[in-house]
Amino acid sequence: MAMRKSIISFITLALLSVTLIACSDQSEDSQKDTEDGWSESPAFELGDYEVIGKEERLAIDHIPFVAGENEHYVIYFWGEQEELMNGPVKIEAFHESSDEKKKAIVDMAGTENEEKVWETTAPQVGKEQAHLPLVLSLPTEGIWRLDVYLGDELFDHIYVKVEASEEA
């Protein structure tokens, strides 16, 4: 009889574990579906600033992106110090209607040497957070996914909404 109770307990525990894992996977899948739906990343407060991204992971100032215009932003990173010190920041930008990656970082903004580049300096790293001020520009309106790398490792991504330029 004790053996039978043990087997029933084991089966019950196994089924409960499978159910919990399945629910966890569904939650991750629905978050992925939202991101695959190409909508702007959620906004949240960071001190006195509103940012968009993933809390405690990656965020950017919630300043409107306007197609073809340069704007100053700060990107915020959270993680282990070793991960945050992985190297320079690289951004690959993808428009919702294309698989072609575009440069988003503007180097030497506002000068005759202004150019779009793939990467810039490493972020300023604190104990569990890093940040990097930089100038970004995206060429067309719509939703863009910014794949943000630290060194050669994909750190995470943010979805931003780019508005049409008033000149267009």
Image: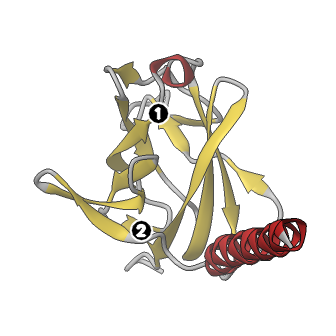
> Quick check: 156 above or below 143?
above
Image location (x, y in percent) of residue 39: 55, 79
- Image height of 50 relative to 57, above or below: below
Residue at 86 percent across and 73 percent down: it is 1
Tell me the residue at 62%/62% (across/down). Answer: 145
Q: Which of marks 2 and 1 is in front?
A: 1
**Which image quadrant for residue 148?**
top right
Res. 16 image quadrant: bottom right
- Please rate how many residues cluster around mark 1, counting C-alpha atoms within 10 Å: few if below 14, some from 14 to 19, many from 20: some
The x and y percentages for residue 60 are 38, 52
Reply above or below: 35 against 81.
below
| 92 horizontally vs 80: left or right | right
Write down the residue under mark 2. 66
On the question of residue 36 being in view, the answer is no
Q: Which of marks 2 and 1 is nearer the N terminus?
A: 2
Residue 2 visible in the displayed image: yes
Q: Which amino acid does label 1 sit on?
A: Gly
Residue 28 lies, in percent from the top left, at 66, 70
Q: Do the residues labelled 2 and 1 touch (CB within 8 Å)?
A: no
Left or right: 29 with respect to 126?
right
**Residue found at the far left of this picture:** 48
Identify the residue position indicated by label 1 in the image.
Answer: 79
Q: Which of 3 and 131 is in front in this view?
A: 3
- Disc 1 is placed on an element classified as loop
Q: In terms of image quadrants, where is residue 91? A: top right
66 or 98: nearer the eye?
A: 98
Q: Residues within 10 Å of mark 2 (few under 14, many from 20)?
A: many
Q: Which amino acid does label 2 sit on?
A: Val
Relative image position of residue 97 (x, y in whole percent): 75, 77
| Number of numbered labels in the structure image | 2
Residue depicted at x 39% and y 42%? 75
Q: How far apart are marks 2 and 1 (CA)?
A: 30 Å
